[in-house]
Image (cartoon, rainbow, N blue to C red):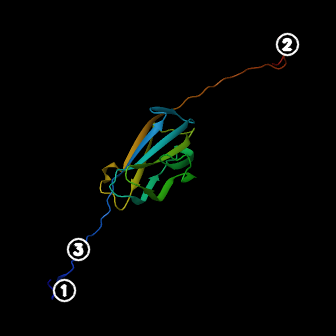
Amino acid sequence: SSIDTNTTNNSSTVTNTLTRQADLSIQKTNIPTGAVVAGQTLTYNLTVTNTGPSTVRDALVTDLFSGEFASVTWSGYYEGSGTPFTSGSGNISVPNITLDPSHTAFFTITGQVNYSSTANFITNTAYVSSSIDTNTTNNSSTVTNTLTRQADLSIQKTNIPTGAVVAGQTL
């Protein structure tokens, strides 16, 4: 049997730097697509996805609405959950969203197109960001609707006095 006379070389340490990385993306859709009538309800859906490889703990979703879109309410849901993790009204600015790799968060946004709008289009862009996102080319999504106006006008005329009128009488 041998005896180790130099114990200073009996261990080794390796230090690795842990780097978290993820790829967040956002996709925005609208209902209805195409033309929307001033005064009509418009719904936007956001899909925020983390394709990994790391968990994101600081995702920020923002969506600012123009004056063409009013009475806005929204809710955010995690994939597979029927209960919102956040909700509100007006502009969206939700920080510190946690998303594991291959998981998704959804936002449903509903509002009314301003009935007195004179714009020809309503355009809206949503954004997602994170300090560990390595691909920022897919961090915004824009939808545009053509804005139209419709009216259903009617007129009804009545006379006073009713019934027979004598020539020369005020009507």
- Disc 1: which residue: 8
Q: Nearer the viewer, residue 134 or 57?
A: 57
Quadrant of res 55: bottom left
- Disc 3: which residue: 14
Q: Give the quarter of the figure containing the C terminus.
A: top right
Q: Position of residue 12 (x, y in %)?
A: 21, 77
Instruction: Say if residue 113 shows up in the picture.
Output: no
Q: Position of residue 157 (x, y in %)?
A: 74, 20
Q: Residue sitting at 53 percent across and 38 percent down?
A: 42
Residue located farthest toward the bottom when viewing the structure as drawn: 5
Taking 132 as reference, is 38 above or below it?
Answer: above
Q: Give the quarter of the figure containing the N terminus.
A: bottom left
* Residue type highlighted by circle 2: Gly
Lateral position of residue 131 relative to residue 170, left or right: left
Q: Earlier in the sequence, mark 1 or mark 3?
A: 1
* Residue type highlighted by circle 1: Thr
Q: Position of residue 53 (x, y in %)?
A: 32, 55
Q: Earlier in the sequence, mark 1 or mark 2?
A: 1
Residue 42, numbered label: none
Query: Disc 2 on helix, strand or loop?
Result: loop
Q: Nearer the viewer, residue 106 or 1?
A: 1
Label 1 – label 3 distance at C-alpha: 16 Å
- Disc 2: which residue: 163
Query: Disc 3 on helix, strand or loop?
Result: loop
